[in-house]
Image (tube, rainbow, N blue to C red):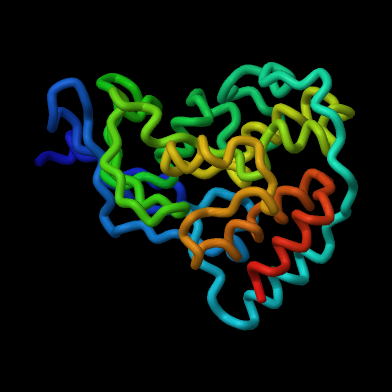
């Protein structure tokens, strides 16, 4: 392969090699070194891939300390909530988060961040059409294609409807747009697990994979602290219990 045909990229902190013309209708991207999921405590910006378990005693103590900072309040009404209150789906126009303004939809940015063997539509540097995903919520290895798009969904760790009832109804649109497109709040996951979660807080839903639950509630707390979203007393108790 000539130098002209090989383009080195840095994507999500992982060196990848782009191989053009390797498959009809796509160009393939393979990782030069397999990317590994990051612990939430080492990924405060949300730009590193995946969600690794919080394993050590010191890290679990740090997670509990973070969760302890969360404000609590009762869940408010859903009056006025609609997805459009957070702007267009996967908008590239959020004013203050990573990846915004790069010309790609947020969903594609996240698939590229967390996927391996990512393939793009011909002529596009954005539209992901196939990849492999190690799902943090279930532990499944998913071979995903755009023709079965819902098999992988991008989860809002702190759900949009949850945030609306707790705080976001009073936010300006710019803050809601950031919240909906912030990679810290977004994880590509098994679609069925995401649909089961719906708009639940941690007291009502936790990932089926038990060893990831402390990491999940830590990420939930990171987002809630960043955007000053209170949680319910039951959610806070449940979150603390996952990181004992």
Rendered location of residue 136, percent (x, y): 45, 54
Rendered location of residue 218, percent (x, y): 65, 60
Q: Identify the residue shown where x is 34% and y is 52%.
A: 140
Rendered location of residue 61, percent (x, y): 70, 77
Camera-nearest residue between 80 and 62: 80
- 29 sits to left or right of 64: left
- 207 sits to left or right of 244: left
Camera-nearest residue between 73 and 188: 73
Q: Residue furthest bottom?
A: 57
Camera-nearest residue between 29 and 158: 158
Q: Identify the residue shown where x is 77% and y is 71%.
A: 65
Camera-nearest residue between 1 and 194: 194
Q: Is residue 4 visible?
A: no
**Can you say which quadrant of the picture contains the N terminus?**
top left
Q: Is residue 73 visible?
A: yes
- 225 sits to left or right of 160: right
Dividing the picture into quadrants, the one containing residue 142 is: top left
Q: Identify the residue shown where x is 70% and y is 73%.
A: 62
**Can you say which quadrant of the picture contains the C terminus?**
bottom right
Rendered location of residue 198, percent (x, y): 59, 36
Q: Determine whether 74 is above or below 52 in the image.
A: above
Dividing the picture into quadrants, the one containing residue 238 is: bottom right
Q: Determine whether 120 is above or below 218 in the image.
A: above
């Amino acid at each position: 392969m000539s130098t002209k045909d090989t383009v080195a990229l840095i994507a999500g902190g992982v060196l990848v090699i782009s191989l053009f013309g390797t498959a009809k209708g796509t160009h393939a991207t393979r990782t030069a070194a397999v990317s590994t999921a990051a612990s939430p405590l080492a990924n405060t910006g949300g730009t590193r891939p995946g969600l690794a378990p919080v394993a050590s005693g010191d890290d679990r103590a740090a997670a509990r300390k973070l969760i302890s900072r969360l404000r609590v309040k009762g869940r408010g009404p859903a009056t006025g909530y609609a997805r459009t209150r957070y702007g267009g789906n996967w908008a590239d126009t959020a004013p203050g988060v990573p990846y915004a303004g790069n010309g790609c939809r947020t969903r594609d940015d996240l698939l590229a961040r967390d996927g391996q063997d990512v393939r793009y539509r011909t002529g596009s540097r954005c539209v992901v059409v196939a990849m492999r995903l190690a799902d943090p919520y279930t532990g499944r290895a998913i071979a995903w294609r755009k023709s079965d798009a819902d098999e992988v969904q991008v989860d809002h760790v702190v759900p949009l409807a949850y945030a609306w009832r707790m705080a976001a109804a009073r936010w300006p649109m710019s803050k809601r747009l950031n919240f909906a497109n912030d990679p810290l709040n977004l994880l590509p996951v098994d679609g069925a697990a995401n649909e089961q979660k719906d708009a639940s807080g941690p007291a009502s839903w936790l990932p089926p994979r038990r060893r990831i639950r402390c990491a999940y509630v830590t990420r939930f707390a990171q987002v809630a602290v960043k955007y000053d979203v209170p949680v319910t007393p039951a959610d806070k108790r449940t979150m603390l219990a996952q990181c004992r």
